[in-house]
Image (spheres, helix red, strand yellow):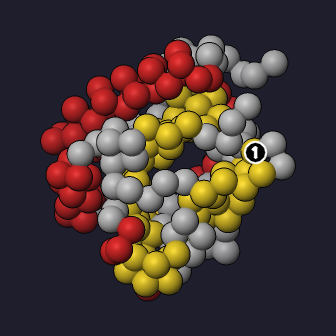
Amino acid sequence: MIAFHTIPDAFSVAECAQLTEIARAAPAADAGLVRATTEHNLRRADLVWLDDLPETGWVMDRLIDLVARANREVFDFDLTDFSESPQIARYGAEREGHFTWHSDIGEGRLASRRKLTLVTQLSDPGAYEGGTLEVWMNSNCATAELAPGTAVLFPSFALHRVLPVTAGERFSLTVWAHGAPFR
């Protein structure tokens, strides 16, 4: 199995800028972990949930299409639904925004059903330093593409991290596709 599947131009540069501005204007929550716990040594970011924003309904339609195509072409997982809202994460240098090694499958009611993770780069890589998304799969660490609008998909059980942002700010869009537990 590959570390991740990349879809260039999943969102246009203009759409990425629009989503970033929407996220900047919306009230953000401190990013937590599964079961509503917070541990800043593990994760430091601000989150905006798209289900809370009326002008972003089109985003979910795009994400559903991207996941369906990638699943059909690459993963062939038994996916049934999207039980969680897409989120935009802001990793800012003022807090050394980061997320240490983790998988997206957890003990929570929804997290236990996550099968496929999609992360879309919204920021131009010149707008920040650090903040690299790395995925660990098959004893290999792969670095995700940084071009705005690029979607990266990987199994939710894959270990991954976002390195600390040391200058500027990085925005990304994440959603999970759900299904019956892996067996």
Quarter where residue 153 is shown: top right
Left or right of 183, for residue 90: left
Question: Residue 159 in the image: x percent, y percent?
Answer: 72, 49
Residue picked out by circle 1: 137
Left or right of 107, for residue 67: left
Q: Is residue 182 above or below residue 153?
A: above
Residue 58 seen in this snapshot = yes
Neighbour tally class for label 1: few under 14, some 14-19, many 20 plus, Cα within 10 Å: some
For image coordinates 73% across by 51% down, the residue present is 136
Question: Residue 166 in the image: x percent, y percent?
Answer: 50, 83
Q: Is residue 24 above or below residue 83?
A: below
Residue 111 seen in this snapshot = no
Quarter where residue 104 is shown: top right
Q: Is residue 20 above or below residue 128?
A: above
Quadrant in which the N terminus is drawn: top right
Q: Secondary structure at mark 1?
A: strand
For image coordinates 50% across by 61% down, the residue present is 31
Marks counted in the figure total: 1
Q: What amino acid is found at the position of numbered circle 1 in the picture?
A: Met
Left or right of 120, for residue 26: left
Question: Residue 3 in the image: x percent, y percent?
Answer: 68, 42
For image coordinates 39% across by 68% down, the residue present is 125
Question: Residue 112 in the image: x percent, y percent?
Answer: 69, 32
Quadrant in which the C terminus is drawn: top right
User: 42 or 173, which is in the foreground?
Assistant: 173
